[in-house]
Image (cartoon, rainbow, N blue to C red):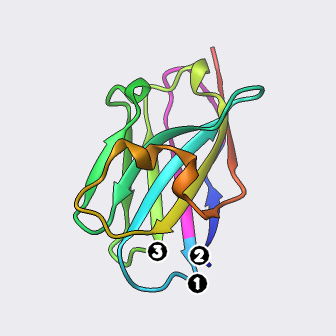
Amino acid sequence: QVQLVESGGGSVRAGGSLRLTCSATNKPPGSYCLAWFRQAPGKKREGVATMYTGDGGILYADFVQGRFTISQDIAGRTVYLQMTSLNPEDTATYFCAAQACRLAGISYYWLRPDGYKSWGQGTEVVVSS
């Protein structure tokens, strides 16, 4: 099973930026659905962004509104989430997830946590006003 480790979280002021990194090991070759999720205290885990490596398709949650960008490195072992224009509502623990998949194209299903078996431990993001 793919092992994932997130890093890059921290504390920033509203309007600031952070780049989260998710490093994958023990990842067999093939196409994957990759995603970033977040969970604020007392709230359900929600999808932020998802990417299908088979065709590069990407989807974002509505609340992202163009502020975040998901990407991966050429080797396919690292997934990034570049976050800009952060606001206090973005405060949460951010998790990356991965699942081997073969799709005709990415869909909003992959912004749900149900389909993922591999998860990182999370990295905390705190945005102050």
| Relative horizontal placement of residue 127, taking residue 61 as reference (left or right) | right
Q: Where is mark 2, residue-wise?
A: 2
Q: Main secondary structure of the magenta part?
A: strand
User: Picture coordinates of residue 40 (x, y %)?
Assistant: 69, 30
Please tell me the numbered disc located at residue 123.
none
Please tell me the numbered disc located at residue 26.
1
Magenta span includes 20: yes
User: Picture coordinates of residue 45 (x, y %)?
Assistant: 64, 37
Quadrant into which the N terminus falls = bottom right
Q: Please report the residue visible at 55 percent of the width from the left and 59 percent of the height from the top.
A: 116
Q: How many marks on residues? A: 3
User: Quarter of the image holding residue 14?
Assistant: top right
Quadrant into which the C terminus falls = top right
User: Quarter of the image holding residue 75?
Assistant: bottom left
Q: Which residues are magenta?
A: 10-23
* 6 in relation to 18, above or below: below
What crowding class fits label 2: few (fewer than 14 Cα within 10 Å), some (14-19), or many (20 or more)? some
Q: Please report the residue visible at 50 percent of the width from the left and 26 percent of the height from the top.
A: 86
Q: Please report the residue visible at 51 percent of the width from the left and 64 percent of the height from the top.
A: 98
User: Picture coordinates of residue 114 (x, y %)?
Assistant: 57, 50
- Report the amino acid beneath label 1: Asn
* 118 in relation to 86, above or below: below
Q: Please report the residue visible at 68 percent of the width from the left and 49 percent of the height from the top.
A: 123
Secondary structure under badge 3?
loop
Real-space CA distance between mark 3 and mark 1, rounded to the nearest whole angstrom: 9 Å
- Report the amino acid beneath label 2: Val
Please report contact status of discs 2 and 1: CB closer than 8 Å, yes or no: yes
Please tell me the numbered disc located at residue 77.
3
* Sequence-earlier tag: 3 or 1: 1
* Sequence-earlier tag: 2 or 3: 2
Magenta span includes 8: no
